[in-house]
Amino acid sequence: MGWLGFFCLFLSGCSYEVLHYSAKNNRTYASNNASVSSIPSSGIHRVQSGETLFSIAFRYGLDYRDLAKANRIDAPYTIYPKQKIRLVNSGGSVASVSPKSSSSSTPLIVQSAKSTPVKTVTPTTTKTAVTSPKSDTKDSKITSDWFWPVDGQVTRGFSNSGVSSKGIDIKAAEGALITAAADGTVVYAGSGLIGYGNLVIVKHNDVYLSAYAYNERILVKEKQNVRAGDSLAVIGGKGEDRPLLHFEVRRDGQPIDPLDVLPK
């Protein structure tokens, strides 16, 4: 992506490509609550520089496969600034998203990828065709090892009611590395989604995405393959609430409680 600047950072004996954002920029973009945006009455989203089909789907709580099919966009889902994207729900018609209500607010001490994983959902290597039907997640044989993205304490749980939180907030140590919760491919790395600051989105398979928000620095680039435990970013925070990671998991485009897939 031409508008992004890259430089190399030598850290812990490894070389990373770092997306260069200022802390001030991150605090500005993370000043609002991270949430799913309402679909505009026109049902159309005009592509902004730096956006990907995955980030647009993530923004509206939609499945990227529905967007690809409705807009006749084939893999690898290349889009262009000022392009008009029709926003659709799982039925193929323009609609707002109404995810199932649930909540969780219990404080929890967690450990990241170096700890023992719990088997939950595992990716299998498949090629996505926009004409193929969406996977039935209940019957899917997709299984994977998921890990906590950072060691810390959960200070805010998942909720779809009231002041919603589409993920969990994890307080961690200053300078902590944010790591991939499972194997996958980076499909978005940037600061274009208001309320998420410097954001990384990882596609694990056709069903699951994970998102890592409020980062101080991003250490990966789009289309980069990552393994569970690989460093994605350096922890940042929301406004003065630092250091903090906001972590989300999407299944078929819908936010789910990350605690449902992370090790207990």
Image: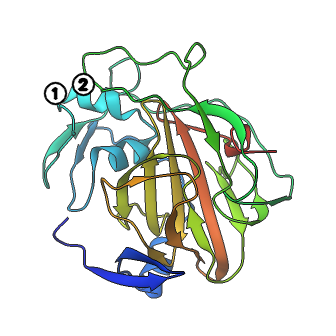
Question: Hey, which residue is sitting farthest front in the picture?
Answer: 13
Q: Which of the 4 image quadrants contains residue 67? A: top left
The image shows residue 89, relative to residue 37, as above or below, that is: above
User: Which image quarter is the N terminus in?
Assistant: bottom left
The image shows residue 31, relative to residue 259, as above or below, that is: below
Image coordinates of residue 129 in percent, x first then y, are 26, 23
Residue 72: numbered disc: 1
Q: Secondary structure at mark 1?
A: loop
Q: Nearer the viewer, residue 209 or 14?
A: 14
Image coordinates of residue 13 in percent, x first then y, are 50, 80
Q: Residue at x 16, y 27 (%)?
A: 72
Q: In the visual, does 22 lie left or right of 47?
A: right
Image coordinates of residue 37 in percent, x first then y, are 45, 48
Q: Nearer the viewer, residue 7 or 27?
A: 7
Q: In the visual, does 102 lie left or right of 76?
A: right
Q: Residue at x 43, y 63 (%)?
A: 194
Q: Nearer the viewer, residue 179 or 162?
A: 179
Q: Given the image, on which type of amino acid does mark 1 rest?
A: Arg
Identify the image's colour scheme: rainbow, by chain, secondary structure or one colour. Answer: rainbow
Q: Which residue is mark 2?
A: 69
Q: Given the image, on which type of amino acid does mark 2 rest?
A: Lys
Rounded to the nearest angstrom, the CA distance separating label 2 from label 1 is: 5 Å
Q: Residue at x 86, y 52 (%)?
A: 106
User: Which image quarter is the C terminus in?
Assistant: top right
Work out whether residue 136 can be spotted: yes
Q: Which of the 4 image quadrants contains residue 109? A: bottom right
Q: Secondary structure at mark 2?
A: helix
The image shows residue 247, relative to residue 131, as above or below, that is: below
Q: Residue at x 62, y 66 (%)?
A: 245
Tags 2 and 1 touching, CB below 8 Å:
yes
Q: Nearer the viewer, residue 38 or 50?
A: 50
